[in-house]
Amino acid sequence: MIDLGREQLIPISHAAKAVPGRGVHRSTVYRWVMKGVNGIKLESVKRGGGRFTSREAIDRFIVAATEGPVAISVEPDSAALEEEAEQLGI
């Protein structure tokens, strides 16, 4: 939850620039607020007719959304590929 006493609010329309890395489109930030990612939503508050988040909320969202099992890609070794090719007659 956003701590209004400690966190500086930024408009959702400007929050895309606060995302670390290459940046994201502002529609992505709106989607994170409204629908979330894997059940995790970006924290926001509505103030004076506008919706706001904070840099800290963005950091918490990124950590929470990226936690969990990590997919590992395993490349077959060349011997296995050669054997499979032989079986296929290649």
Image (cartoon, helix red, strand yellow):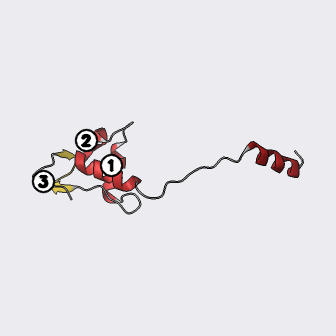
Secondary structure of the residue carrying numbered label 2? helix
Which x, y percent locates residue 43?
Answer: 25, 56
Instruction: Tell which circle, 3 or 2, labels the residue nearer the N-terminal end.
Output: 3
In the foreground, 45 or 21 = 21
Residue at image position (37%, 37%) is 21
Between discs 1 and 3, the one toward the N terminus: 3
Specify the farthest residue to the bottom: 39
Helix, strand or loop for disc 3: loop
Give neighbour class at mark 1: few <14, some 14-19, many 20+ (Cα, 10 Å). many
Separation of marks 1 and 3 at Cα, in angstroms? 20 Å
Residue highlighted by disc 3: 4
- For this orientation, the residue located farthest to the right is 89
Q: Left or right: 32 with respect to 51?
A: right
Q: Quadrant of the C terminus?
A: top right
Residue 67 lies left or right of residue 82; in this view the side is left
User: Which quadrant is home to the N terminus?
Assistant: bottom left
For the point 25% across and 51% down, the residue is 57
Q: Quadrant of residue 41?
A: bottom left
Q: Amino acid at mark 2?
A: His
- Badge 2 density bin: few <14, some 14–19, many ≥20, Cα 10 Å: some
Cα distance, mark 3 to mark 2?
Answer: 18 Å
- Tags 3 and 2 touching, CB below 8 Å: no
- Label 1: element kind: helix
* Residue closest to the eye, 71 or 47: 71
Identify residue for label 2: 14
Q: Are marks 2 and 1 in contact (CB under 8 Å)?
A: no
- The amino acid sitting under disc 3 is Leu
Q: Amino acid at mark 1?
A: Val
Q: Which mark is residue 29?
A: 1
